[in-house]
Amino acid sequence: MAGEIPDLNAQERTGTGKGAARQARRAGMVPGIVFGGDVDPLPIQIPFNELLKKLKAGRFKSTLFNLKVDGHDDVRVICRDVQRDVVKDLPTHLDLMRLRRTTKINLFIPVEFINEEEAPGIKKGGVLTAVRPEVELVVTAGDIPEKLTVDLSGLDIGDTVTITDITLPTGTKPTIDRDFVIANISAPSGLKAAEDEDEGEEAAADEVPATEQAED
């Protein structure tokens, strides 16, 4: 289970329709609706600045939130839509969907690398490059993994870790339907330069100089 699900604080909104929505916006709020979960839709409003901050942080639509509304039980939600002003591109309305424990959703799960001290490539000065420090997975709302673990033991310079090298939690799968790189261990820059120089010298040595024509 994911360790920390971020809170999304909202207020219950009185009234529905365009008039109530405009009133919320004038008060510095963004109106929204919470639907799904076999419960009546709940009109809400979120402070504009708070929502804008979360939107700028990125991946708002693929983040699971713990919705907190005074007078209501906390509920897990995911954003299904954010409507924006066509001119200013600022949020004007949002739709949140309640999740059942069995609901399948797409979430970005962080990757943790362990046992770097057991990787021969790193001992030699190799550099670990995390190509994907997090991976988007299809997960079950009631069983979200906290992280994916990559064991670097035995990896040498030039070795690559792909998604098929990771044991994924039961019931999860990547959103990308192909094998893709998670990380690799590359040679240190000094060693790369030396190798490139050696290759250049070998190439020069392999060149056969033109033979001079023999004098008659």
Image: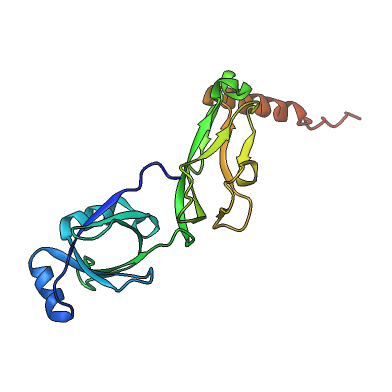
| Quadrant including the C terminus | top right
Rendered residue at 12%/69% (across/down):
24
- Residue 31 x, y percent position in the rendering: 19, 69
Rendered residue at 56%/35% (across/down):
150
Colour mapping used in the image:
rainbow
* Total residue callouts: 0
- Residue 57 x, y percent position in the rendering: 30, 50
Residue sitting nearer the eye, 121 or 172: 172
| Quadrant including the N terminus | top left
Q: Compared to 181, does 51 lie above or below?
A: below
Q: Is residue 192 left or right of residue 135?
A: right
Q: Is residue 27 left or right of residue 13?
A: left
Q: Is residue 213 left or right of residue 100?
A: right
Residue sitting nearer the eye, 83 or 31: 31
- Residue 169 x, y percent position in the rendering: 57, 46
**Among the 4 quarters of the image, the one containing residue 36:** bottom left
**Among the 4 quarters of the image, the one containing residue 70:** bottom left
Q: Is residue 162 left or right of residue 75?
A: right
Residue sitting nearer the eye, 25 or 71: 71
Q: Compared to 19, does 27 lie above or below?
A: above
Q: Compared to 145, does 184 lie above or below?
A: above
- Residue 2 x, y percent position in the rendering: 43, 45
